[in-house]
Image (cartoon, helix red, strand yellow):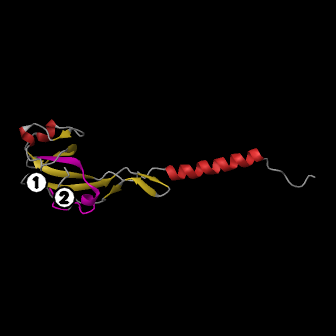
Amino acid sequence: MAGKPEISSAAIVVLVALAAMGAVAVGLRSGSAVVVVDDTRPVEIPADGSGVVADLRAPGGWALFGVQLVDPTHEIEVRFLAGPGCSELLDTGDHWPVPYPECAGDAGITGVVGTLGVTATGRSVVGVKVTVPGECFDLLERGAAWPSDAPGCASAG
C-alpha cells in the first residue's frame, strides 16, 4: 500500500521530547525583567546632607511557568550632597560609607556608590545604591526623603 506514510515510534518519541524541551525552555526563562521608575525629571537634593530617593529598580527574580520562585532585588538610589572634593575621591561601584571627611553627610546609609557629580556651587553629589525590602520599595517614589518612615524602610540602608 502506497497511500499513508507511517510514523515510527522513534519519530514520535523525538517529537514529544522536542515539545517537552520547548515547554521547559519557556518555563525556565528568567523573570529578570527590570522594573524601573522611568522619570527623567531631576530630583531636588536637600542642602542639609539628608538624602532623596532618585531611582528605583527591581532587577532579578526567577519564575517557572509564571510562578515567581525567587523575588527580585529591590534597589533604590539615594542621592545627597557631600563636601567639595568628595566625588573626586570616589568611583562608581565603591562601597559606602567611606572614611573621607569630605564625604560626610551620608544620610545614614550603607551601599554601593552609583551616581557622582558636582553642583554649580562645588558641592559633591553622591548617589548610593541601597537594597530595601519589597514592602519599603512599594511605598517609595522618586523625590521621597531618605531615610524614610515607610514600613519596612527602617531596616534598610
Left or right: 105 as drawn, with respect to 32: left
Image position of 87 with respect to 80: above or below:
above
Verify CB contact (< 8 Å) between mark 2 and mark 1: no
Q: Is residue 130 located in the magenta-colored stretch of the structure?
A: yes
Which residue has dot 2 on it? 43
What residue do we see at 6% from left, 54% from top? Answer: 48
Residue 47 inside the magenta-drawn segment: no
Mark 2: few, some, or many residues within 10 Å (few <14, many ≥20)? Answer: some
Q: Where is residue 6 shown, x and y percent of the image?
A: 83, 50
Looking at the image, is mark 2 or mark 1 nearer the viewer? 1
The number of numbered discs placed on residues in the rendered structure image is 2
Q: Could you say whether the residue bearing mark 1 is in a helix, strand or loop?
A: loop
The magenta-colored residue range is 124-150
Residue 51: image quadrant is bottom left
Residue 149 x %, y %? 15, 61
Q: Residue at (23%, 49%) from the top-left corner?
A: 130
Horizontally, is 57 left or right of 32 in the view? left
Question: Which amino acid, mark 2?
Answer: Val
Quickly name the residue at label 1: 50
User: Could you say where residue 155 lies in the image, as x and y percent from the top left?
Assistant: 19, 53
> Callout 1: 10 Å neighbours few (<14), some, many (20+)?
some
Nearer-the-camera pick, 123 or 78? 78
Q: Nearer the viewer, residue 129 or 137?
A: 137
**Residue 128 numbered mark, or none:** none
x then y, percent, for residue 134: 29, 57
Residue 4 showing in the rendered view: yes
